[in-house]
Amino acid sequence: MKGVLLINLGSPDSPTPKDVKPYLDEFLMDKYVIDVPYLLRALLVRGIILRKRPEESAHAYAKIWWEEGSPLIVLSERMHKKVQPLANVPVELAMRYGSMTIEKGLQKLHDQGVTEVLLFPLYPQYAMASTLTILVLAEEIRKKKFPNMKFSDVPAFYNKPDYIKNVADSIQKNLQGYDYDQLVFSYHGIPERHVRKTDKTKSHKKFVTNEMCCEVGTPEAEFCYRTHCYETTRLVVEQLGIPKDKYCVTFQSRLAGDKWLEPYTDVEIDKMPSRGIKKIAVVTPAFVTDCLETLEEIAMRAKEDFEAKGGEEFLAIPCLNDNDEWCQTVSNWINDWAK
């Protein structure tokens, strides 16, 4: 019997330092997120970051927290509830970090008699800190707890026509009546070395701003997060007919101390008012679900900074969330696999 496990990032159980700290510890101690030797990672995370970050992050979570709970969890659950009736096989939901564990999700499928699982990371573009860590952990759990289960997984869907249409339609709908100067495609940032580490050909080209580093369809592009981001953008703007001077690609949420993908979202947005760009819209296609990075970092903080620098209008375009068309797309992919 076949079944599907939808997997998103996760969230603390509450916007308090007490719950945020173990969540951040699990997240930042993941060797695919901070990819340094264990002792150095433990020193960095537990000796430095976790001394101040839980309180700061709890404050940020509190700003976006809903009465029902974490927006990421609530929206993911709404999506799951819409997808399940449309799918021809059991579908469960899990998170990579936090209390809604992958093990619990697999157990729910196992209890329904599922022996073949489609792992569905809810990340359009492939990255070791998102897709890879999910697949690795799921396989570790399978070997220990569910040795008779078979796994397959959904490849990165950054260029799938249905996904591109969903994103383009969402942008078009939200931009109706909004005369913007610039549409910013803000993707989650990653260290440059992560891109090189996932390149199995070891032939990665130099990063050039506003250009793809790989040619789509080549072996080196298969797991190249940066190329996936630029290709998603290219396909969306092509479908919407947006001229080249009306959009840009940036990367957000970097940590200090490493060379991360550029250009940086906050830096670029802060410069825009002085360049005469006073009305902007920001879309975040690395996320299918609104979360801390989209609701607080972009819709609140980036908006405040933009306006403080002289910007006049700032529109944060929501993620796909539980959009009916997106839920239909996900269920169609599931049913195609389940045939």
Image (spheres, rainbow, N blue to C red):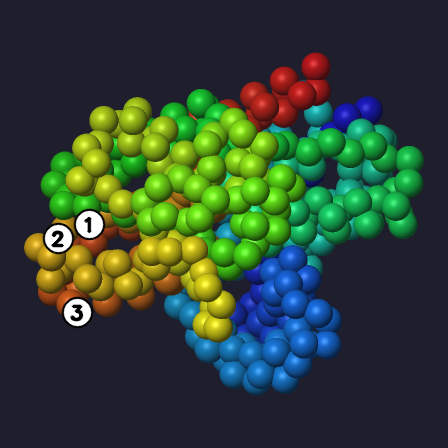
Q: Residues within 10 Å of mark 3 (few under 14, many from 20)?
A: few
Q: Amino acid at mark 2?
A: Ile
Residue to which mark 1 is pinned: 280
Instruction: Compute the Cα span from label 1 to label 2.
Output: 7 Å
Nearest the camera: 254 or 212?
Answer: 212
First reached walking from the N terminus: tag 2 or tag 3: 2
Nearest the camera: 155 or 58?
Answer: 155
Mark 1 and 2 residues: CB-CB less than 8 Å, in contact? yes
Q: Amino acid at mark 1?
A: Ile
For the point 44% across and 23% down, which residue is it? 161
> Is 212 situated above or below 36?
above
> Is 2 situated above or below 5?
above
Instruction: Compute the Cα span from label 2 to label 3.
Output: 14 Å
Taking the image as shown, residue 209 lies to the left or right of residue 31, namely left
Taking the image as shown, residue 67 lies to the left or right of residue 102, namely left
Taking the image as shown, residue 148 lies to the left or right of residue 52, namely right
